Amino acid sequence: MDHRDILTRFKNGDLGREQAAALLTGAHPGSAARHALLTAEVAPPRAAVSQPPPARALTTAPAGGGPPLPADGYAITALHGRFPDADGLDAFWHTAVLGGRDAGRRTSGSPAGAGDFDAVFFGLTPQDAALMDPQERLLLEVLWQTLETAGCTGARLDTLTAADGEPRAVGVYVAHDPLGRAAVAPAAAGAGVTLPARLSTLLDLRGPGHCVGGGGAAFLVALHQALSALRAGECGAALVGAVGPRPGPARRHPQGAEGGQGVGAVLLRPLAAARAAGDTVHAVVRATAVAHPGRRAREAAADRLARRALAAAGVTAAGVGLRETETTVAATTGDTGAATGLAALVRAVLQLRHGTLLPAPGDSSAVPWARPHDQSGRELPRRATVAVRPAAGSPAAHVLLEEPPRRGPEPIAAGPAGPAAASGELVLLSAPTPEHLAATARRLADRVLPADAVEDGTQDGRRLLAALARELRLGRAVRDCRLAVVARDTGELGAALRAFADDLAGADDRDGADGRDGADDRDRADDRDRADDRDRADDLAGADDLAGADDQDGAGGRDGAGAGGARGSVRCADLRGAQGPGVLLGELPETRAYLAALWRGRRLDALARLWLAGVDVTAADTAGAAPVLPLPTSALLRRPLREAGCPATDGPTPS
């Protein structure tokens, strides 16, 4: 018997749990069990019934053997999206709660900045960026922002491994409407390369990938394929994104609402791994089902997939309190093409998160969503299905979602105590250019560190500061333009970051407001590079005498800011023109051990000096596991791109 037969007979009662487990794992059962197994092998199958067999559950072993899969499903650890007139999920929720009736809401449109792009942030030239299809530019942005939301663009990304131990094993699965041009210039990525391959190259992701063509169910099909890769151990996490349709005149949905362009993505991980890592879990995917209808009616195909998904998860239809379809989505977004399934899933996840049911078509207001109970009165999780019926030439898809297991509020890890607390926390930030660094610093200060958020010097303030510093070290990518600041509380950090952003903005004003286009950025950067080279030389000279610096930094409660100035002042370095291997070889185990010792000893000044001299000190942070702290994504400085491949002269638009 193959695994499917074993599981079917176990479900029908022909095999006991021990017998089925023995067959699945290849274990040798006892004599009584062996007799039962031999009997089961020749037992006649039950009579066929009209109901189709259940889909292979997410909780079973994959075909061909292997260890049983976790029974708790797959976690959505991050989601990000932009839809017509809703540049972000908060705006999307607001529009959906109002039932699309906001007086100021337009009836169609595209995500903000669909015609703009930050080529520098992604390491592209403006010419190559202009040759990309607008859908790919949007996908590239939201995939990166989804990873950042999950805290997985820095050292933590290396912990997402495949079954063979390969780090950065993140699959990329995308759904999009037909592209209108070659996505990236051949010199940049190679002619004929698939969209997931190009995105994986730009983001340095090493998992599998697949591209799903247009159709309302395309995103759900891509999600179904991503789960298959996770089950097979081909990746440790999977990004699933969608964008559609192409920018242009709005299309009208059959329900009457005009549509526009939508784009978004989710990050998936096995639930057990996500909870062990402290990830935020927005919802749990319990089962998926995908199929073409053949010649069957659309409704019959959709009903069949619904039964398969429910059977795979062991859930009855009565246990589902919400059904999102392409029809319910139309009221909020209109026709968004390949992103229709994404919009439906986002609506379902947000309703699970808020415990609120959005207005159905024709209803006037949202209502609270009470949790169901079983016959014994035990509380059950809220569940929702997301389904898109088949259209001409495209499949149908069905996804069963469940709210995450309930747990108390995640405690913020305690910060240092005693003399170590007096030395403060080392906060590290980096970006591709000084302008990006200043914009990200200001965004972090304004959104996370408002002046009246936490009273300075309180225990909660110190804990928040420690968690924020740790999240920036482990969750963010290391770039060439770097910032380091030692602060004792969140108020001091917020003031230092704002002052840094203001100082750089003032320097840019002195250089001339008309110097913000790409060519003038390079000219101005040359002047800064010459000055920064002198600063960098000072940093390198200081790093050569780390032993002396170690004796003087904050472990003894003295000034942790070191030679960079008073405590709370920002030190920065621009390493874009740096040559040579740097002061330390990061790939040596001795280097990693040395850096880990500096972290354990809280040698903050030495670590700051090394960071500004070009050493990646974040990878050696040995602080241990802690909950992921959600932070604002890095600032993007989008610029209009001309169709001819040359950047326009308009200034950047921070986002």
Image: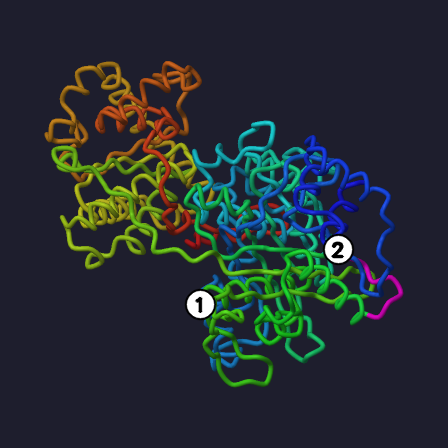
Where's residue 26, x and y in %?
71, 32
Q: CA distance from mark 1 to mark 2?
A: 38 Å
The amino acid sitting under disc 2 is Asn
Instruction: Find disc 1 in the rendering and name its residue.
Output: 354
Q: Which residue is mark 2?
A: 12
Question: Splitting the image into 4 quarters, where does residue 190 fall?
Answer: top right
From the top left corner, tell me how far across and down residue 382 is, in percent: 52, 66
Is the residue marked by circle 2 packed among few (<14), some (14-19), or many (20+) residues within 10 Å?
few
Q: Secondary structure at mark 1?
A: helix
Dot 1 crowding, Cα within 10 Å, few <14, some 14–19, many 20+: few
| Point 76% across, 51% down: residue | 14
Q: Is residue 98 magenta?
A: no
- Which residue corresponds to the image point at 31% horizontal and 28% vertical from the top-left? 612
Magenta region, main secondary structure = loop
Q: Is residue 295 magenta?
A: yes
Q: Quadrant of the N terminus?
A: top right
Per the rendered image, the range of residues in magenta is 291-297
- Nearest to N terminus: mark 1 or mark 2: 2
Residue at x 68%, y 61% (from the top left corner): 398
Badge 2 element: helix
Q: Is residue 423 above or below residue 100?
A: above
